[in-house]
Image (tube, rainbow, N blue to C red):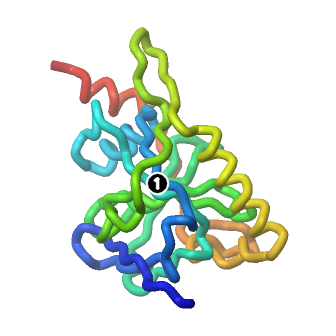
Amino acid sequence: MTRAPLDLTCTCGQIEGHLRNFSPRMGTHAECFCKDCRAAELYLHQPDPAPGAVGVFQSTPDHLILTKGSEHLAVFSFGEKNLLRWYASCCGTPLFNTPRDPRMSFVAIRTAAIADTAALGPVTAQAFIPAGNDKTRHKGIIRLVGAAVARIALRRITGRWRDNPLFDTDSATPVRPVTVLAQGTRSRLLNERSRP
């Protein structure tokens, strides 16, 4: 039975897409409190999520369909080997996080871009929760990682990793040039925000 898609869009509406044949079982609804995710929001001039988290739905790119405005996609990274962070160049909306290698079939979709977050079901994992003394802890992380590894492995076996709107999988390169931010950018963004 074909299920309804779950719509997603940037803030200004120039980028539109959906998760096809959506079911909450196709991914994991999670929250991340890490410094990289917070700094990415600040870099894109979004509201500071701290002390809260950044919401994501972890799934695979073969479910992701972009129907409008893909020319407005842009991507940056905090380093040469760090995650790719995709956003809408038209309005700065954070959209997706992906590995650099498309064979690692993984996408974390920012829940702020999803029209109906209730359809994702409850948050089942939290990463890098502040625990005092500059320490962090996790909830549901084993399930989160295990589910991601299983999805990646299945797509490697079936070849579905090639169904990826964010990469040219023949050359294994992103469909947009990656802006690698200068060393120290993340720390600068966080330090500026922490000043009284």
Quickly name the residue at label 1: 29
Residue found farthest to the left: 196
Locate residue 62, reporting x and y percent: 62, 75
Q: Name the residue type under label 1.
A: His
98 relative position to 126: left or right: right
Locate residue 176, reporting x and y percent: 53, 69
Locate residue 75, reporting x and y percent: 48, 59
Q: Secondary structure at mark 1?
A: strand
Nearest the eye: 110 or 189: 110
Locate residue 105, reporting x and y percent: 68, 63
Nearest the eye: 60 or 184: 60
188 relative position to 149: left or right: left
Residue found farthest to the right: 157
21 relative position to 174: left or right: left
- What residue is drawn where x is 65% and y is 54%? 148
Q: Does residue 62 appear in the picture of this structure?
A: yes
Note whether 139 is above or below 85 in the view shown. above
Residue found farthest to the top: 133
Note whether 104 is above or below 168 in the view shown. above
147 relative position to 18: left or right: right
Note whether 95 is above or below 183 in the view shown. below
CA neighbours of label 1 inside 10 A, class few (<14), some (14 to 19), many (20+): many
Q: Quadrant of the N terminus?
A: bottom right
Q: Quadrant of residue 191?
A: top left
- What residue is drawn where x is 21% and y is 20%? 195
